Amino acid sequence: MTDDERDLETIRRRQARSGRVDYGDPVVLHDTSRRRLVAVPFFIPHSDHTELAIKLITYSKAPPPTDWVVIEQKSISIGEASSRKLLAALRTHLAVAESGESGDFLVIRVAEGTAQLGTHDPARVAAALTKVLSQDEIVQHLQGTELSTEFIAAFRGAIRLNEMRAAVAQLRQFLDGGEVSEPVYQDWCEKHSWAFGNAYVMRDDVREISTGDTLDLMLPSVIAGYRDIVELKRPSMEVLYYDEAHRNFYFSADVSKAIGQCHRYLDVLHEVASNGLRDHPEVVAYHPRAIVVIGRSIRWEEARLRALHGLNRRLSGITVMTYDHLLAQGERLVEMLAPKGESPSDDPFASDPEFNPFDEDIPF
């Protein structure tokens, strides 16, 4: 078939006898003297879209001069998701076949606006992508298009979102693996201070605010740029205890010590940096707040969670949170930034589970 003939090809869509699905003309994929393989497209209507599904049928051929024996020998039905996977696999492997060479080929799946790296080494992906984008024809195209700015922004955004996803996965791995080393979480929080909420956009490299007073983390707020502090303790430490006699929860000794430590830091920081730190005038801390991250809460009951919330409400300028809260907060931020997926559509056949759209008597 020539390109002109393909452009003029007519796609016919007919209603099946049930009236609940349509089908298209069969496409002969393979034809020999004894076998024929046919693909039949089905158009399955939903409330907001039409799903394309495929039924693959094998027919046997009687000896000449007898015509086709229209009896299914084998058949397999695949839905739209599987059909798309098959199409993607064919395109990918056709590209490999057209290269005419042996070797390793880097294939990156793109879905929902982000690249799914899978098991690929990020360094290799970055190196390969850099080489592609540095090709003269690519550079000329990007320079000559009005979308170059949007492209760069989208590219950076996709990379940033993947970095955030990887960071959240790493924190979960630390916690699930029983990691209790405070320096490990110190390093993670320094690299991913965004996890403390969208009120903070970065962190300061400054740690020492006075002789003998070194902070774990100092965060500039988005609105005013004033600094708040973070005090990190080990996730293995207890957060709350329950007093059976008085029937109330109370902070553990480790939390109480951390709160006292933060009070000192807050007083010192407000005093020395209310108008800018001496050697760092850009660091301004006017009535700063503190966040203490300590312990785990993954198996807490509702009463204990409510108790922590209540105790926090009665603290002045200090919030106590667990590493599980920090993890959940990071996951929520990633969820908010991720491209919105399509909401599941109503399935008109959900009320009739016995109905199979492929069980149609299609006249060929």
Image (tube, rainbow, N blue to C red):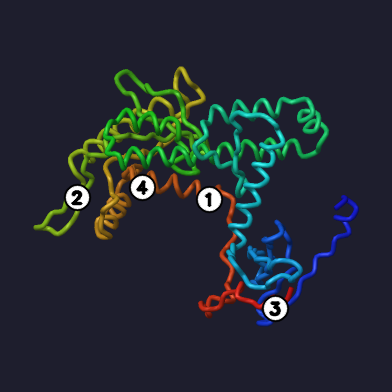
Q: Residue at x 68, y 73 (%)?
A: 70
User: What's the distance in space between the residues labelled 2 and 3, CA to CA?
Assistant: 69 Å
Please name the residue that numbered disc 4 is placed on: 325
Which element type, helix, strand or loop, lies under badge 4?
Answer: helix
Which element type, helix, strand or loop, lies under badge 3?
Answer: loop
Q: Is residue 36 above or below residue 104?
A: below
Q: Residue at x 62, y 61 (%)?
A: 80
Residue pushed farthest right?
4
> In this rendering, which labeled residue sits more in front, label 3 or label 1?
3
Please name the residue that numbered disc 2 is placed on: 250
Q: Amino acid at mark 1?
A: Met
> In the picture, residue 149 is in which quadrant?
top right
Disc with the residue nearer the chain's start (3 vs 1): 3
Q: Quadrant of the C terminus?
A: bottom right
Q: Is residue 7 shown left or right of residue 318?
A: right
Residue 16 - label: 3
Disc with the residue nearer the chain's start (2 vs 3): 3
> In this rendering, which labeled residue sits more in front, label 2 or label 4?
4
Please name the residue that numbered disc 1 is placed on: 336
